[in-house]
């Protein structure tokens, strides 16, 4: 089944990239409240669990709406943002897109980059969403996108490895550091941080410092909240994780995994790496490569005083409609199906996290399908005093700054003081540029 997915994805991606060769000029189509016969393109990224569920959901849609054909375009995260950005610049983007939180800044800074979904209320039921959830997708007073789910990163562990080691899941940062010694004696790692996914290592270091200082790394309005000293503390903490054998060094990870994502790594699949930090909405790709029930959610790490503040949440994914679509009513109807249809909700399950739609969440709950690691992660985060991630923290350029600092400290090409100053200057200058 996985090989089939990859073949289809390759074909879809090839079609999408070939369409980017020339800029198209579109005339905005106004909604008329009716559904006409047409074909729509829908793009998303994810792991095979999400691909399989989404393709099944599209099959259901085609049965219910045979006159409106959905053409899927999908693949993994690596390079996906760049691909869609190129499509948007060329005016060749799909009619419906799964988008990331930060894309609202880069693709629609004034609110005019996507279709205003408030204009499509005849087909899209927004009453199923809390106002705060809808606010995540508003830019310049326009509803650019609807939040699919709200998620945060949680810690997940290989229960078989921890049981073999006679170890409990860590509850504090010191507990985590201490595990490095016992696991390291057997050539194992209690945790690893997927640098390929962009910013995972820095995310954990940010949580550690936010918990200590009460300061947010980047504010919601795009201002740097950390001092140079805060960044030094974060980088020192990351280096301590490596030196304590809690995680692999960047060199070791690169030598052993190459460019593969952590969930595809033989080191994780084989149990040498026994823990991951991942979004609750995306943990399925890790869960699916291990035997059923092996991966379990652990507690959010706290300081020695029991404070677990500083962990972050965000809209994990959003659905948007191209401002250039010729079929806005039909696109809105399909998004409504993905978000609010009860049968569709049961097919998609938690492959995109716990649904933000009350109707979809109720459908999963009533069918007994509101369970699994996504639900456990959601429950853990709801019981914590979390903060909302700034969309600016998620920008691709920002992740380059984080990884450059992490790699320079890990390889020893820069000391922590200079790496921290470089990151502070780069992040601050970039944020100032975006605000102009």
Image: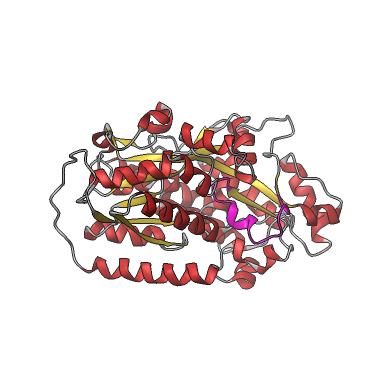
Evaluate whether residue 322 shows in this view: yes
Front residue (pair 102, 378): 378
Please indicate whether residue 330 sits to the left or right of residue 252 in the image. left
Q: Residue at (59%, 39%) from the top-left corner?
A: 367
Q: Residue at (37%, 54%) from the top-left corner?
A: 62
The number of callouts visible is 0
Asked if residue 378 is positioned above or below residue 395 in the image, the reply reads: above
Asked if residue 286 is positioned above or below residue 373 in the image, the reply reads: below
Q: How is the image coloured?
A: secondary structure
Quarter-of-image position of residue 287: bottom right
Q: Which residues are magenta?
A: 279-295
The question of residue 436 being in magenta is answered with no
Q: Residue at (62%, 72%) from the top-left corner?
A: 255
Residue 37 at x, y = what percent?
Answer: 23, 53
Evaluate whether residue 216 shows in this view: no
Asked if residue 260 is positioned above or below residue 112 in the image, the reply reads: below
Quarter-of-image position of residue 306: top right
Front residue (pair 205, 232): 205
Residue 210 at x, y = what percent?
Answer: 57, 36
Please indicate whether residue 231 sits to the left or right of residue 162 in the image. left
Please indicate whether residue 287 sits to the left or right of residue 326 in the image. right
Main secondary structure type of the part rendered in magenta? loop
Residue 312 at x, y = what percent?
Answer: 54, 38
Residue 364 at x, y = what percent?
Answer: 55, 39
Quarter-of-image position of residue 406: bottom right
The quadrant of the rendering that contains the N terminus is bottom right
Please indicate whether residue 123 sits to the left or right of residue 73 in the image. left
The quadrant of the rendering that contains the C terminus is top left
Front residue (pair 106, 237): 106
Asked if residue 174 is positioned above or below residue 304 in the image, the reply reads: below
């Amino acid at each position: 089944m996985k090989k089939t997915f990859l073949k289809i994805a390759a074909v879809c991606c090839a079609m999408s990239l070939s369409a980017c060769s020339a800029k198209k000029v579109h005339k905005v189509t106004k909604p008329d409240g009716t559904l006409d016969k047409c074909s729509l393109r829908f793009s998303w990224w994810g792991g095979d669990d999400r691909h399989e569920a989404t393709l099944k959901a599209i099959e259901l849609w085609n049965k219910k709406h045979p006159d409106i054909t959905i053409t899927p375009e999908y693949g993994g995260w690596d390079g996906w943002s760049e691909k869609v950005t190129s499509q948007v610049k060329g005016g060749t983007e799909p009619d419906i897109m799964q988008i990331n939180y930060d894309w609202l800044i880069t693709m629609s800074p004034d609110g005019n980059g996507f279709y205003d979904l408030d204009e499509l209320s005849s087909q899209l039921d927004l009453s199923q969403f809390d106002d705060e959830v809808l606010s995540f997708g508003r830019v310049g007073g326009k509803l650019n996108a609807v939040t699919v789910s709200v998620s945060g990163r949680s810690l997940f562990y290989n229960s078989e490895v921890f049981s073999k080691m006679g170890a409990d899941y860590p509850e504090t940062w010191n507990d985590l550091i201490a595990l490095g010694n016992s696991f390291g004696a057997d050539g194992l790692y209690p945790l690893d941080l997927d640098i390929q996914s962009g910013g995972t290592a820095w995310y954990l270091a940010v949580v550690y410092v936010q918990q200590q200082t009460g300061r947010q790394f980047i504010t919601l309005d795009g201002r740097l909240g950390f001092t140079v000293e805060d960044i030094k503390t974060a980088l020192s903490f990351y280096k301590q994780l490596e030196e304590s054998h809690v995680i692999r060094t960047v060199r070791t990870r690169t030598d052993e995994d190459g460019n593969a994502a952590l969930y595809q790594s033989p080191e994780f699949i084989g149990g040498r790496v026994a823990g991951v930090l991942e979004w609750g909405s995306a943990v399925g790709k890790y869960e699916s490569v291990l035997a059923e029930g092996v991966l379990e959610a652990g507690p959010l790490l706290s300081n020695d005083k029991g404070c677990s503040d500083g962990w972050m949440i965000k809209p994990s994914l959003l659905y948007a409609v191209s401002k250039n679509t010729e079929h806005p009513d039909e696109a809105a109807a399909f998004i409504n199906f993905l978000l609010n249809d009860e049968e569709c909700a049961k097919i998609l399950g938690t492959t995109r996290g716990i649904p933000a739609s009350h109707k979809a969440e109720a459908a999963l709950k009533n069918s007994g399908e509101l369970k699994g690691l996504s639900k456990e992660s959601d429950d853990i985060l709801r019981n914590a005093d979390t903060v909302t991630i700034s969309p600016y923290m998620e920008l691709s350029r920002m992740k380059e700054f984080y990884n450059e600092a992490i790699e320079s400290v890990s390889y020893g090409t820069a000391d922590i003081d200079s790496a921290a100053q470089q990151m502070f200057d780069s992040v601050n200058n970039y944020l100032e540029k975006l605000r102009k």
